[in-house]
Image: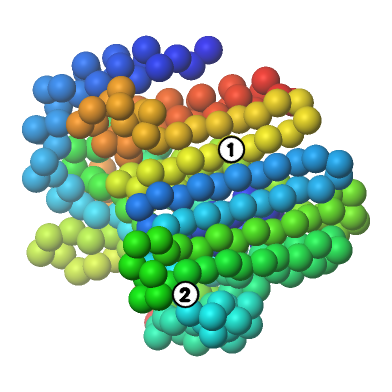
Amino acid sequence: MKELSLNVLDVAMNSVKARAENILIKLIEADGRLTLIIEDDGCGMSEETVKNVMNPFYTTRTTRSVGMGVPLLKLAAEQTGGGITIASVSEKDNPEKHGTTVTAEFYMNHFDFTPVGDMVSTVTTLIQGSPHIEWRFEHITDKGSVELDTRELREILGDVPLDNYEVIKWIEGYLREGYESIE
Amino acid sequence: MKSLAELAAIREKMKDKVVLREGSGEIRVVVGMATCGIAAGARPVLNAFVEGVSNAGLAEKVTVSQTGCIGVCQYEPVVEIFEADKEKVTYIKMTPEKAAEVIEKHLKGGKVISEYTISNAIS
């Protein structure tokens, strides 16, 4: 992947597929480190499946036998000296509280650090594709933060769906302004 | 500065339109957004369709959605176009520029751009 924001898009799609109702995407930049957290309340995974998703030749899909999302994120993190962890509780083990949290850590000064890139496009793409999900996005740097919570937008929008073009354009503009303010 | 008041204005504007939109989407544009598609550049292609369809005034007629792996990863970014009573058209190796052309010629003009389709690549 050319930018980390594409890895974020890709891995967040796993949360969508896990039928999550709430997905949090959080990036924290501090002391030369970037911590990425993607947390969902989807169906979760068994311990064995968690082990398997790190393996590039594992997938639950049947159309093709290679699932590369998590391994690519792992590679991007490890090549900077960081790494990833996955914590998951399956719906089967706990019907009340289940879901998956993927945490990746990157050393931003490392030569092989992939730039974060266009997070705004990633967030708007995710909301456009899954407007029924509640998305929370936070990007915290030492200069400030950019945040968006679809619950707050929905309160104002009422019946207007989040994938309405004007709403998507508003979200895009709002986030771009947010990023300009912490440049 | 983007304000929440603008969102409220969008809601007001959409009040009458919401009903109209139902039963719309005679044409479905589906963009492959699995790892293979994303790595090959599907994100800007999707955004070009979302933006282009709206700017061309086709929003009532065309819906743009995302799907997983279509199964022809070597041809990503792949875009499928579904239209009632017509055969599915699969465009391959898409770019935002090609997307603009597809909107103009295919979605607006009703003419398939054969040279961008998968049938053209495998025949």
Instruction: State which chain disc 2 sits on.
Output: A
The residue closer to the viewer here, B99 or A159, is A159
Residue A82 position (above or below residue A4): below
Q: Which of marks 1 and 2 is nearer the N terminus?
A: 2
Instruction: State which chain disc 1 sits on.
Output: A
Q: Distance between the residues labelled 1 and 2?
A: 25 Å
Q: Can residue A137 be seen in this view?
A: yes
Q: Which residue is drawn at 43% across and 26% down?
A: A170
Point out residue A135 in the picture as x, y percentages from the top left corner. Answer: 43, 43
Neighbour class for label 2 at 10 Å: few (<14), some, many (≥20)? Answer: many
Helix, strand or loop for disc 1: strand
Q: Type of residue at label 2? A: Met
Q: Mark 1 points at which residue?
A: A138
Residue A18 shows which numbered tag? none
Q: Which residue is drawn at 35% across and 48% down?
A: A133
Residue A45 shows which numbered tag? 2
Say whether residue A111 is left or right of residue A114.
Answer: right
Q: Type of residue at label 1? A: Glu
Say whether residue B22 is left or right of residue A136.
Answer: left
